Amino acid sequence: MKQFRWFETAALGVALFMGLALNSCSDEEDWMFSEDEFSEAQLALSSATITKGAISVRTGPGVWYDRMGGLRYGKKVSVVKEQAGWLKIKYGDAEGWIYRPDTDFASSSSSASCSADIANFIRDNYPDGYNIIFAYNGSDQAAEFHSQANSFSKEYHTLNVSSGALKKDIYRKVKNYSEFKSGILETGRAVVKCLADNPRSGYDDSKCSQIKNLTVMTHGFTTGLNFGGGYFNSSDISDFGSTVFGFLNRQSLRVQLYACSTARNKNTKENWYERYTGNVIKEQDPFTGGKGSFAQLLSEEMGADATVFGHTTAGHLSGNYAARCYGKMANGAVHGKHMFDVYFPQSFVTEQAKRIGKSEDTTRTSMYSYYRSTGAFPGNNSGRDTFMDPEGKGKKMRDAWLSKNP
């Protein structure tokens, strides 16, 4: 039976009415609850006991926050509230956050069942966070989305909740923003509960219990996503970040938008083939069409250590070679970085132009023609590692170009 604590209900009510606004990893005062929002009765504390040998107390609800101290087995602490698998506690004269499964604190966060095999699979395969995927649930081109999502989910062993149980190798169909958001919350809570119910001695679950790769396959446009029955618009981004942030490993998060035009703004069209075979533009020359796109705005909400990928042209799944990243992999550039520039950086172009005795423009055009003609496309089966393993993919592509240009 679910166990409820009265203050959880109070905290949820405050969350619904106040809304959380996430701006950055370090600026926690902008999104954390202020105690002024609680009544005196609501601040009456519950308690929890530490059940692991030694745990960290952090300044916020996530492993990316600074460590402010530690607690040992058997220590009893006062709990202010629970949030996304973390407990806000009284810590000396201050307040800190601890990972809930390291305590005996009872949570009503999930009713999904989970086997010990799934818990150990998560620990063994997702040390820095797990993979999750959502797909369009409309009518047009539905078969294409579902075929790709099904194949992707099995290749990357994505997690989701289905029929009341946490399972791997599955994806979830969603029709609107609300279903998308609730799907993340349901799976996130189920993963936290699964690991807590099936503990492994000496193992810290605080990283593997969060999402590392969040993939969405749906129709897109310059200011949002179309799930078939509703939209996820730019205006929803702040709500999205404040709702799901506790379930995301924002130290290494990657959000992959397999969706048309999500990486360019509404005022710009883009043809990368013409761009590189005509007036060649170097990597250091920003293309302003990426600034103000849905992917760029989402990247800002996810924080400086996250990377968001999106498509710059039509072509949500197969055959779209034009993709751009934002955030960490783009060094924070608001215009983003095209995936070609990730794979073939200017330093590599300069080095190879000198080696083969050709101009940098000619060499760069040769590299781009190779890039466009290969399986680098972010949407097709052979191009999934464009998003899932961009570092490895880049090395493969450079090595392959070198083999063709000895």
Image (cartoon, grey):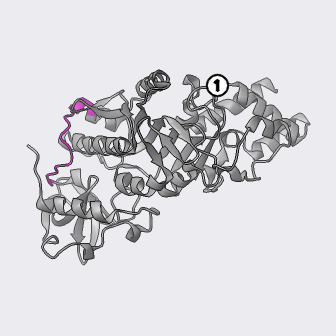
- Which quadrant does the N terminus fall into? top left
Main SS, magenta region, reads loop
Q: Against 97, is 282 above or below? A: above
Locate residue 372: give its quadrant.
Answer: top right
Q: Against 139, is 258 above or below? A: below
Give the magenta-colored segment's residue range: 104-118
For the residue labelled by badge 1, is the local secondary structure a helix, a strand or a loop? loop
Amino acid on which the number 1 mark rests in the picture? Gly
Q: Is residue 404 left or right of residue 148?
A: right
Q: Against 283, is 64 above or below? A: below
- Is residue 395 in the magenta section? no
Q: Position of residue 27 (x, y in %)?
A: 44, 68
Q: Position of residue 227 (x, y in %)?
A: 44, 37
Q: Is residue 405 left or right of residue 45?
A: right
- Is residue 117 in the magenta section? yes
Please name the residue shown 87% across and 36% down the image.
Answer: 362
Q: Position of residue 112 (x, y in %)?
A: 20, 37
Pick the front one: 178 or 89: 178
* Residue wearing tag 1: 375
